[in-house]
Image (cartoon, rainbow, N blue to C red):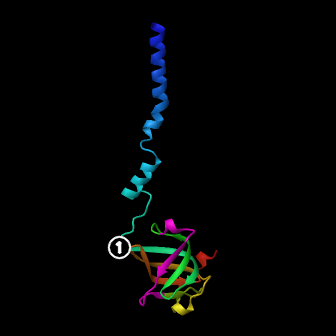
Amino acid sequence: MKKRWTLLIFVVLATLIAATPALAAGPGNQNRQENQHRYGVGVPQLHSGESFALTGTITMLGDNSITVLVQNGNRLIKPYIGQELVVQVTESTRYRQWTPEGCVPITFEDLEIGDTTSIQGTVSEEVFTAARVTVDVPCCTP
């Protein structure tokens, strides 16, 4: 009888020791991802009027937009690295071309597909709007 109790206690202790890491990990991955999204951990939350900055290559030009293959950017841009992002332009968007002597003003019509670019602007309701577009930036050359 004593051997049975000893064996039972040993099995219970072994089970508790084996289960401790799993219990310490908390909820499963699905709940963890939901909590990260809910509380903004690991997922940048876009708030109206926040500033963004990105570097990349122009892949398409629309009537009022520039599509960029994103190479780098601030925390709002990180989820888009390696992807194309459509950035809206307005009448107040400023356009510049980088030269070794300094940036010179250009127009939207001077932009070309394949230009390396640096764009700064704001995000509102998940719409990225450029305040400044600079092309031929040497730090962005692929």
Outermost residue to the top: 1
Residue at image mark 1: 48
- Residue 18 to residue 35: above or below: above
- Residue 97 to residue 11: above or below: below
Amino acid of disc 1: Ser
At x 48%, y 9%, the residue is 3
The x, y position of residue 105, in whole percent, is 51, 92
Asked if the magenta segment contains residue 26, the reply would be no
How many dots with numbers?
Answer: 1
Q: Which residues are magenta?
A: 77-94
- Residue 103 to residue 78: above or below: below
Q: From the image, which quarter does the C terminus lie in?
A: bottom right
The x, y position of residue 139, in whole percent, is 59, 75
At x 42%, y 90%, the residue is 91
Q: From the image, which quarter does the N terminus lie in?
A: top left
Camera-side residue of 48 and 60: 60
At x 56%, y 92%, the residue is 110
Neighbor class of circle 1 (other Cα within 10 Å; few <14, some 14-19, many 20+) is: few
Camera-side residue of 98 and 70: 70
Is residue 104 rendered to the left or right of residue 129?
Answer: right
Outermost residue to the left: 48
Asked if the magenta segment contains residue 78, the reply would be yes
The x, y position of residue 135, in whole percent, is 56, 84
The x, y position of residue 21, in whole percent, is 47, 35
Q: Dividing the picture into quarters, in which one does residue 114 lie?
A: bottom right
Camera-side residue of 118 and 108: 108
At x 55%, y 77%, the residue is 68
Element under disc 1: loop
